Image: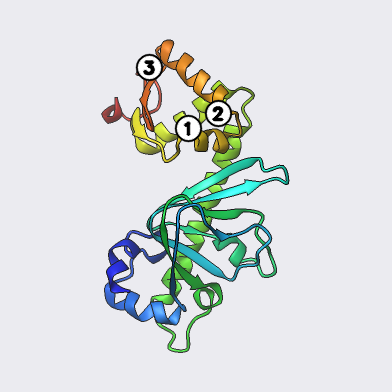
């Protein structure tokens, strides 16, 4: 598994953990690796899970679907990011989302009981990973609240402006790439793709922004809260 150490060191879950500690931890945590083709389901709504997934290569989408097949993308996970940790940490909980391979993906699964329980050797780095997991859960909760803010806006334009504003603040600048395709962005914001594309075109014509595929440049006044270096 050492070939994946560079990716693991980018993961918040393993922040502050050395190569030597990581090598000792992986067997302790019951780590296993799985590979999945594009479009496959790693986990399905209704499943009970007892493992945390950590993406090593490729990307996954966390998707909610109703019985009519309407999709709502909750988030996207790439290398170094985790999924299913909330459900794994809640004994008896079943997934109300599915995890879908956006591309061919390689994932490391870690048994949650081994993550949350100090091992017999009482390794000092085990408490660090528990703290890291709590930090990651808090970050996921903040992102979910942010998504609810976007979706709570009344119009497609207001949803787009809320999303782009949050991305600009996060990146510290008016120019950035988003992780979604047009259809994925529509699913994330809970709008129709045609309406989203139409609104983006209008916003460009009005001089509010410019874009090419997933790259966006916002044209905002100098008086907002972004740092001077971002202007």
Quadrant in which residue 88 is drawn? bottom right
| Residue at position x 45%, y 29% in the image | 165
Residue 128 place in picture, x, y as percent = 42, 70
- Secondary element under disc 2, as helix, strand or loop, is helix
The numbered disc on residue 182 is 1
Is there CB contact under 8 Å for labels 2 and 1? yes
Residue 27: in sight, yes or no? yes
Real-space Cα separation, disc 1 to disc 3, in angstroms: 26 Å
| Residue at position x 61%, y 42% in the image | 72
The numbered disc on residue 193 is 2
The numbered disc on residue 221 is 3
| Residue at position x 36%, y 37% in the image | 171
Colouring method of the image: rainbow
Quadrant in which residue 58 is drawn? bottom left
In the image, residue 68 sits, relative to residue 92, either above or below, namely above
Residue with the most extreme bottom position = 120
């Amino acid at each position: 598994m050492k070939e994946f150490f560079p990716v693991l060191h980018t993961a918040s879950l393993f922040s502050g953990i050395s190569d030597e500690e990581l090598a000792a931890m992986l067997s302790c945590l019951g780590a296993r690796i799985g590979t999945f083709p594009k479009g496959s389901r790693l986990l399905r709504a209704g499943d009970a899970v007892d493992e945390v997934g950590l993406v090593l290569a490729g990307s996954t989408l966390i998707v909610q679907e109703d019985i009519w097949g309407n999709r709502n993308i909750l988030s996207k996970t790439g290398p170094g990011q985790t999924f299913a940790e909330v459900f794994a940490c809640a004994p008896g909980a079943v997934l109300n989302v599915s995890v879908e391979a956006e591309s061919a993906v390689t994932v490391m699964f870690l048994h949650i009981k081994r993550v949350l329980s100090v091992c017999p050797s009482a390794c000092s780095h085990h408490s660090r990973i528990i703290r890291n997991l709590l930090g990651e859960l808090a970050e996921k909760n903040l992102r979910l609240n942010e998504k609810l803010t976007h979706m709570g806006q009344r119009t497609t334009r207001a949803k787009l402006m809320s999303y782009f504003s949050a991305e600009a603040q996060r990146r510290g600048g008016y120019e950035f790439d988003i992780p979604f395709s047009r259809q994925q962005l529509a699913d994330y914001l809970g709008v129709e793709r045609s309406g989203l594309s139409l609104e983006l075109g209008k916003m460009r014509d009005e001089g509010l922004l410019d874009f090419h595929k997933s790259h966006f440049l916002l044209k905002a006044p100098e008086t907002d809260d972004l740092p001077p270096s971002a202007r």
